[in-house]
Image (spheres, rainbow, N blue to C red):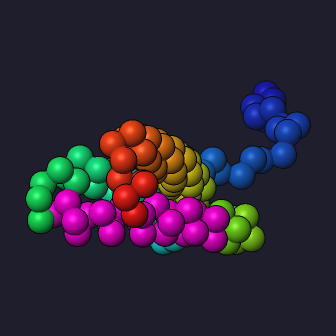
């Protein structure tokens, strides 16, 4: 009688299979936006918002000073933020561009209104005779 021999394995034994890591319930956090980009966007949004309140008697005089300053700060901070974001690669480029675009649009509208005001009031005072009286 012959003894039973199990067949020989021809493939080498494999390493035990490692289970996959459990999926994370939270997404990886994005890096915070550049602070100057946030500041540029806020200043850009403050400028047109102040135009809404410029008709209020006392508040309008205060806002008449705040609005041009906010416009200029939005433009300056936006350019500085874009330069620093390009060097460091941090996030916030969209916010810096938003501040820049709103700042330049408000600057253009402000200059346009100022030119129109000078032309309108200049022509009114010229027609009435105030220019000749001075």
Considering depth in this image, is 85 or 97 the residue closer to the camera? 97
Decide if residue 2 is on the left or right side of residue 53.
right
Considering depth in this image, is 47 or 8 the residue closer to the camera? 47
Residue pictured at 12% horizontal, 54% vertical = 56
Q: Residue furthest front?
A: 133
Residue pictured at 36% horizontal, 47% vertical = 129
Looking at the image, can residue 114 be seen?
Answer: yes
Looking at the image, can residue 98 be seen?
Answer: no
Q: Which residues are magenta?
A: 59-81
Magenta region includes residue 77:
yes
Q: Residue furthest top?
A: 1
In the depicted structure, whether residue 59 falls above or below residue 110: below
Decide if residue 112 is on the left or right side of residue 2.
left
What quarter of the picture does the N terminus occupy? top right
Residue pictured at 58% horizontal, 69% vertical = 76
Considering depth in this image, is 129 or 69 the residue closer to the camera? 129
Q: Residue furthest left?
A: 57
Residue 69, image x, y percentages: 42, 69
What quarter of the picture does the C terminus occupy? bottom left
Residue 113, image x, y percentages: 44, 45
Residue 124, image x, y percentages: 37, 41
Q: Main secondary structure of the magenta part?
A: helix
Considering depth in this image, is 133 or 31 the residue closer to the camera? 133
Residue pictured at 26% horizontal, 64% vertical = 63
Magenta region includes residue 93:
no
């Amino acid at each position: 009688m012959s003894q039973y021999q199990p067949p020989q394995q021809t493939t080498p034994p494999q390493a035990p299979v490692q289970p996959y890591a459990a999926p994370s319930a939270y997404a990886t956090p994005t890096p915070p936006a550049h602070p100057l980009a946030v500041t540029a966007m806020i200043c850009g949004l403050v400028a047109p918002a102040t135009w809404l309140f410029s008709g209020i008697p006392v508040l309008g005089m205060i806002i008449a000073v705040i609005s041009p300053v906010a416009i200029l700060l939005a433009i300056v901070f936006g350019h500085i933020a874009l330069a620093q974001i390009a060097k460091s690669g941090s996030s916030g480029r969209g916010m810096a561009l938003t501040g820049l675009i709103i700042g330049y649009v408000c600057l253009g509208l402000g200059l346009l209104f100022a030119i129109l005001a000078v032309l309108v009031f200049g022509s009114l005072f010229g027609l009435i005779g105030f220019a000749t009286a001075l």
